[in-house]
Amino acid sequence: MIPSSRARRLVLLLPLLTIAACRTVSPPSPPDQSDTGLAQTLSVEERTHDGEQNAIDSQRHLGPLDYRSRVRIDPDREKLRQLAAGSTQSDAIAAESDQEAQELVETRRLIDSLQDYVRLSRRVDADVQAMRSQGLEASRREIEALKDAVRQRAEVTERLIRVLSSALEDYARSEGLRLDTDPETGDFLNSATEEFIFDFEDRLLPDGEPLSIAVATELIEFRVQTLEKRIARDREAIESGRDAHRLKLLAYLVNSAGERSRLHIENYDTLETGGGNAPKSLLGIPEKRWEEVQRRFALSADWARFLNDLRDDDSDLRKRLRDFSRELRTKLGDFVRSLGDRLEEFAVADLDELATVLEDNGAGADLVTRLRDLATRFRSVKGNFDTLRTEVETLLDDLGNDRLTDPSQVFALAKRVGTIPTRLGTVVEEIRGVARELATVEALIDTAIEGLTPAVKSVAQTLRANLQDLAIDALREAVPMFDDYPAVSNFVTSLGQELAAGGFTLGLSENVEKEDIGAELADDVIERPIDEVLPGAFNLDRLASPGERVEIVAQLVSGEEGKPPLAEHRQTLEVIGRGLYPTLDSHVIFANRQGRGRRRFVNGTPVPRDDESFQAAPGVSWTLHYRKEEETRESDGWAPFWNGLDPGLGLNVAALNFDDDAVEIGVGAHLTILGDLLQVGYGWNLSVGEDQDYFFVGIGLVEALNVSGLGNVQKTP
Amino acid sequence: MAIFTVLPTKSDPNAGDSMAILRSLIAEPVSVVYLIVGKPRGIERMLEIAIGRAEAFPGTRRVVYAPDTSVLDASLLDEMQDALPGSAKVVSVVYGLEDTIAAALRSGDAKRRLQVELAFAIGEQQDDEEGLT
C-alpha cells in the first residue's frame, strides 16, 4: 500500500515533464554550414498527393512539407557552372593566368623592340656626351630635356632588365638550379647557380654595351615559351576543375528521437525503397513507423516497470538501492568518519597560542604569519569537511529509505552522489597541503623556541609538544589513509553512474540507431558532373509521418577524393499533415482502475487507494488529427493556435497489470494535445473479470525525454 | 670627367678632399653616380661590373670607389645604410639624376650585372624629390 499522496505526485510529474517539454520544443537553429550560393542553384518543389504544386524556398528553414508529398529538386546547370568557376581555387588560377597573358603580350613585343632600344640608348647617351663636350654650356632647359630623354630610356631599360631577370631565373630553374640567396648579402647559396648566372649575365650585358641583342633574344624567347606553357597549364587546370566539379544530393528523414534514415533520391543514389517494392502502410501509418513504435513500446515498458518498481518496496530495484546504500555506507562512510576523527584531534588552538607566544617574544614575523595562516587554513578545511560529512550522512540515509516514488528522486540522488568524489578530493588535497606546510615550519618553530627566555621557553615547549602530538603526528598518520581515497572515489563515481542510467534501463540513446552517420560518403551516392546534372526527386508517401523532419543535403564536390566539399547546403523541412491525418505513437500511461482504485468514503473519511491507482503501463496510441490551413487566404485566425495545440482523438491499447504478473490487455479512447505529447482517456481491461474500466493519463515518452534533456536530445546533425 | 674615380684614402695627402670630390661628381648635371665603399668580398668583380655598365652609357654614368670609408662623412655612410630596410649590409648606392640616393645594393647584388644595370636605370629615372626607388 502506498499513501494517496504518491499517486498525486506521479500525476504531478506529467505537467512538469510537459513544461520541460514545451520549454525546449523550439525548432533547431538553422544549420550553419549552408552555402547560400549553392542554395540559389536549386529549385525545390513539393507536389502534394492531390496534385497541388508548391514552390519551396531553398533557403527557408523548417518550411512545411506534407507527409504524402513528392519533392523535386531541380539544379540549375548554368548557375552551378558559375559557382564552380567562382570557387576560390579557380579564381586564383584565372587571375594568375590573366596576368601571365598580359605579360606574354608585352614580352613578345620586347623582342621586336630590342634593336630600337639599343639605337635609342646610344643616341641619348651621345646627346649627353655632346652636351659635355660643349663644356657644359647648355641651358637649364636643354639639361632638363636631356634628363627627360635619359629617364625615358631608363624606363625602358628597367622594364627590359626585369623581364630578362625573370627569364634568366626561369632558365636557371629549368636547369635544375636552386636560386636561394643569403638574405644578408644577396649571394647565391649554390655556387653552381652563381656560376651559371654570372656567366649568362656577363654575356647578356657585356662591358661597354647596352646589351647583347642575341643573348637577350634567346632569353626573351625562353620567357615567352615559359609563359605560354604556364597559361596553357592554368587553362587546363581551370577546365579540369570545372569538369571535376560534381553535385551530390541526399535526403534524410529524421524522426522525433533524432534518428535519421536515408531517403532515395532519383538520379542521385542507387538506394531502392523497400527492396524495390512500394512502401507499405497500415491504418494510414507507414510500415517504418510501425517498426519504430514497436521499439518505443519496449522503451515505454521499461519505464513503466521502473516507475512501478519505485513504488514497490519489495521490488528488485528497491532492494538494489538498499544494497547500494549499505556498500556506500561501509566504504565512503568509514573513510569520512576516520578522516573526521583525525581532523577533530587537530590542535588548532595550540597553533594559535604558540603563534601569540612567539610574536610577543620577538620571533620572526614570517614564522608567526605562517602559523596563523595554517590555523586559518585548517579552520576552513574543517568547515568544508563538516558540511560535506553532513551531506554524506544525509545521502546515506536517503539512499536506504523508502521515499523514492518517482524517477526525479533517483536522478537527484545520482547527482548528489556524483558531486562527492570531487569535493572529497578537494578536502583531501587541502589537508595534504596543511600537513606539508606544518612539516616545513617544524624546524623554524624549534629554532624560534631556542631563542626565548627560559620562562617563556617552557610554555612554548609545552605548546610545541601538544602540537606535535595532536596535529603533526595526527596528520602524519592520516596521510597514508589518503592512499585509499582513489579507490573510494572510483567506487562512488561508478555508483553515481549506475544510479543515473545503467541500473534502470534508461539508456535511451542505446535504442537510437546510428545509421547513416557520414552517409555523405556512402558508395550508393551518385556524384553528377555539373554538365550532367538532372532533377532529383523523392517520395514521402508511406515513408514519413507528421512530426518528423526532412533534411536535404546538397554538396558541390571536386573530383579529388578526401577533399571537403567546395560548397554545402542543408535545408530542413517540417513534415506535416494537411487536413485529417493519423499518427501512431507509444505512451507511458498512468491507469487508475475504477472500482477498487476509485476513492471511497466510509463515514465521510476517504479510504486510501491501493497499489493499482495510477499504475504505469506501456501503450500504443493511434490518433486522428486535423490540421487547419495556415498559408491560404481561406485560413481562419485560429489556425495557428489550433495547429499549435494540435489536438487529436483516437484509440489506445495498453499492457496492464492489475491483478497478477500476467500481461493484461486494455483498450481505450483518448484525447491528445501537443502532437501526442500529452494524453487523457478512458479504457477497459479486457483480461480481468471485475472493475475493468480505468481512467488514464499518458505521456509520449520519447518526445518528453528528448525535449526535456533526459534522453537522446533531438539535434540537427 | 672620367667614368671611374677612386677617392683618396686616409693616408693620402688629399684625404680631406674625398667628400668634396664625391659631391662634385654627384652634382654633375645629367649624371648618375654609382658609389662603392670598403673592401667587401668580390670587390674586384663589383668594380669590373660597375665600370663595364658605366661604359655602356658613358655620357651619364660614373663610378666612384671609396676603399677607405673613414674619409667619408659618417652621415653619408648612415644614409647609405638606411637606404635598405633591415640589417643587410649596403656596399654600393646609386645617386640619381637629382643627386640623392636612388638605389642601394648588397654585396651579392653588386656582383650581378642585371642588378647593377637595374640600379643604374632606377637612378636614371629619378625625378625631382622622388628620392629612393
Image: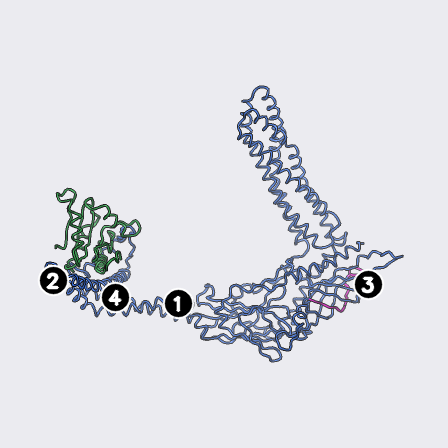
Could you tell me if the residues under marks 1 and 2 are in contact, i.e. CB atoms within 8 Å?
no
Q: Colour of chain B?
A: green
Percent position of residue A664, x then y: 77, 64
Q: Tag 2: Cα neighbours inside 10 Å, few (<14), some, or many (≥20)?
A: few
**Residue situated furthest left in the rendering:** A134
In the image, what residue occupies the spot 43% across and 70% down? A84
Residue designated by label 1: A91
The quadrant in which the C terminus of chain A is found is bottom right
Viewed as shown, does residue A174 lie left or right of A528? left
Q: Amino acid at mark 3?
A: Gln
Q: Chain of mark 4?
A: A
Observer-side mark, 1 or 3, equals 1
Q: Chain of mark 3?
A: A
Tell me if I can see residue A78 in this picture.
Answer: yes
User: Do marks 2 and 4 both belong to one polypeptide chain?
Assistant: yes
User: Do marks 1 and 2 both belong to one polypeptide chain?
Assistant: yes
Q: Colour of chain A?
A: blue
Q: Amino acid at mark 4?
A: Phe
Could you tell me if the residues under marks 4 and 3 are in contact, i.e. CB atoms within 8 Å?
no
Q: Amino acid at mark 1?
A: Asp
- The label shown at residue A594 is 3
Circle nearer the N terminus (1, 2): 1
- The label shown at residue A130 is 2
Residue designated by label 4: A222
Circle nearer the N terminus (2, 4): 2
The magenta span reads: A657-673
